[in-house]
Amino acid sequence: MSNPNHTMTERWLTGSQETQFYTRTYTPSTSPKAVIVFLHGFAEHVGRYAHIHPVLAERGVAIFTFDQRGFGRTALDKEHKSKTSAWGRTGWTDQLEDVNWAIGVAKKEFSGIPVFIMGHSMGGGEALGFATTKEQRYTETVASLAGVIATSPLIEQTTPVLKLVRWLGGKAAIISPYMVIPAVVERSHLSHNAAANEANAKDPLIRQSGSLRGVGDMLTEGEKLITEGCNNWPKKPVLFLHGTDDKVTSYKATQRFHDLIRAEDKKIILYPDQYHELQNEAPEIQQQYVNDIVSFVEAHILSTSTAVVEP
């Protein structure tokens, strides 16, 4: 699919663990200034960003994104998905492998330009977790990144699940890690945009559920960002975007993580009175969201581009 300002390409690519991933690549019509590897949120898919990613491409920023393991078409497309793929069949270790793979794809396809990682909600937690991981096999990939962008990241929930429920879920996950359980998010809490919320409710690629391991890892690893990950921040610039009326993920936790990390180049932008999905709020909020992302990318292109071409 193309228009005069960008091209969108859909492909099924073989990723980590030989998993087939549904992917989308948005390429500017002119030479891209940078590429963003984008990670979507829990129980959704990349099609929900089809109104935003083209705008970023038209601003000169390429996007490589994919339906994550256990979600979207990667889990539900009967014709193309892997035999082992199923709804909610995911976990933190798998997700880090997938992020590493996706960055590798972007680096290969957009050689010589800065690569940023960006995630929303669960994907935001993954982006921050990947940047702060102590696993040696990812050190080189993290070092190659130009920067990190986290929008409404899941560090902590605004209304946390009871500790007893979490404990019981953790015990059950040992026995049956991929058992699917309800994971309900009130759709009216996603954004002030009733049409977008209704579309979410009717979307056949969205289910309000996840696996014991997937949900448990998502919540546990998010909390570890505050207790452990904040001490491992690499020498990478980072941008946080969060609405102050987010009823799903805690903007206060995002602020706390921002304050704790020892980063020379960090910025947090809070959107007063906005909900969880900034990309689906009023048009002027969507425009600010795009502007904030592009401004961050452009501010970190020159120094990174110089580093990329050095032998």
Image (tube, helix red, strand yellow):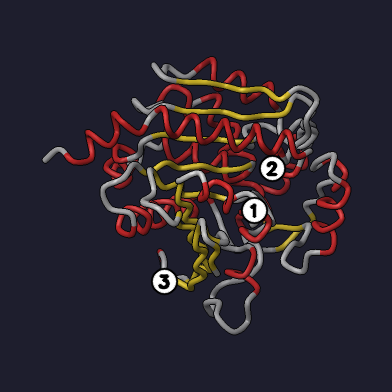
Q: Which mark is residue 113?
A: none
Q: Which mark is residue 49?
A: 1
Task: Left or right? Give the position of 80 relative to 136.
Answer: right
Badge 3 marks a residue whose secondary structure is strand
Seen at 62% across and 70% down, the residue is 73
Measured in 3D between alpha carbons, the distance from the residue under mark 3 to the one under mark 1, in whole angstroms, is 22 Å
Callout 1 touching callout 2 (CB < 8 Å): yes
Looking at marks 3 and 1 on the same chain, the residue that comes earlier in the sequence is marked by 3
Q: Is 134 situated above or below 184?
A: above
The kind of residue on which mark 2 rests is: Gln
Q: Is 84 situated above or below 178?
A: below
Name the quadrant containing residue 153. Answer: top right
Looking at marks 1 and 2 on the same chain, the residue that comes earlier in the sequence is marked by 1
Measured in 3D between alpha carbons, the distance from the residue under mark 3 to the one under mark 2, in whole angstroms, is 29 Å
Q: Is 266 situated above or below 222?
A: above
Callout 3 touching callout 1 (CB < 8 Å): no
**Residue 1, x across and y down, in percent:** 55, 70
Name the quadrant containing residue 67. Answer: bottom right
Identify residue for label 2: 279
Badge 2 marks a residue whose secondary structure is helix
**Residue 60, x across and y down, in percent:** 45, 46
Seen at 52% across and 60% down, the residue is 4
Identify residue for label 3: 14
Seen at 81% across and 47% down, the residue is 185
Camera sees residue 176: no
Mark 2, Cα crowd under 10 Å, few <14 / some 14-19 / many 20+, is many
Mark 3, Cα crowd under 10 Å, few <14 / some 14-19 / many 20+, is few
Nearer the observer, 158 or 135: 158
The kind of residue on which mark 1 rests is: Tyr
Residue furthest to the front in view is 4
